Amino acid sequence: MVNPAHSGDQDLAALTAAELDLAWAVNTRAPLLLAQAYAARHDDTRPDGRILLFTSGQHLGPMPGELPYIATKGALHQLTASLADALADRGITVNCLNPGPVDTGYAPPPAHQQVARAFPRGRWTSPDEIAELVSWLVGPHSRLITGQVVNAEAGFRRHLERLPLITDPMA
């Protein structure tokens, strides 16, 4: 499982080469080199090798305030099918997971509440829920799944997430 995440709030006007280089190094270059190292050490007589990359929902809607992040996570999305094809004959599956917003404690309270309202369940996805899916994707029952980007956003409605924060409950 490969889940690096460097995110900086940079839109087109604020974009810098340094931030692009850092995001590329953490979010794309490192996972690709890890996949290469795993493949080099994989025992091809052992079935069911797994590589699981993580992306975000950049392919499901615009994220104009996080350009370095979405560009590099989008690269992982696009690498998935090619890596899966390159490693298929060796018994290694490669997939990519978009977990959607996961409640890891990073969002300040007003944003946390707003994002929670964008889920049909009225709450964020928990890390344990994503761990269950990861366990399945890297386990023996997923051997037929390769080259796929799995969107597991629990019905997240990104159009609601973009609404201005509602601070007055009577509004």
Image (cartoon, rainbow, N blue to C red):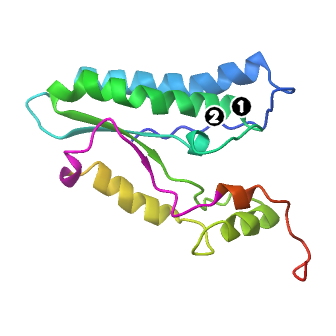
Q: Nearest the camera: 2 or 77?
A: 77
| Most common SS among magenta residues | loop
Q: Is residue 118 magenta?
A: no
Residue 81 visible in this rendered orientation of the protein:
yes
- Name the disc covering residue 33, or none: none
Q: CA distance from mark 1 to mark 2?
A: 5 Å
- Name the disc covering residue 67, or none: 1
Task: Point out the image quarter for the N terminus.
Answer: top left
- Label 2: which residue? 70
Image quadrant assignment for residue 160 = bottom right
Residue displayed at 69% across by 70% down:
117
Residue furthest out toward the bottom: 170
Q: Is residue 149 above or below residue 26?
A: below
Horizontal side, residue 169 vs residue 85: left or right: right
Q: What is the crowding at mark 1: few (fewer than 14 residues within 10 Å), some, or many (at least 20)?
A: many
Residue displayed at 18% across by 51% down:
140
Give the percent coordinates (x, y) of residue 55. 52, 40
Circles 1 and 2: CB atoms closer than 8 Å: yes
Residue displayed at 57% across by 58% down:
102
Image quadrant assignment for residue 2 = top left
Question: Circle 2 — which element?
Answer: helix
Amino acid of disc 1: Leu
Horizontal side, residue 8 vs residue 27: left or right: right
Give the percent coordinates (x, y) of residue 107. 73, 58
Per the rendered image, the range of residues in magenta is: 140-157
Q: Nearest the camera: 115 or 159?
A: 159
Residue 42 visible in this rendered orientation of the protein:
no
Residue displayed at 81% across by 27% down:
12
Give the percent coordinates (x, y) of residue 24. 60, 23
Amino acid of disc 2: Ile
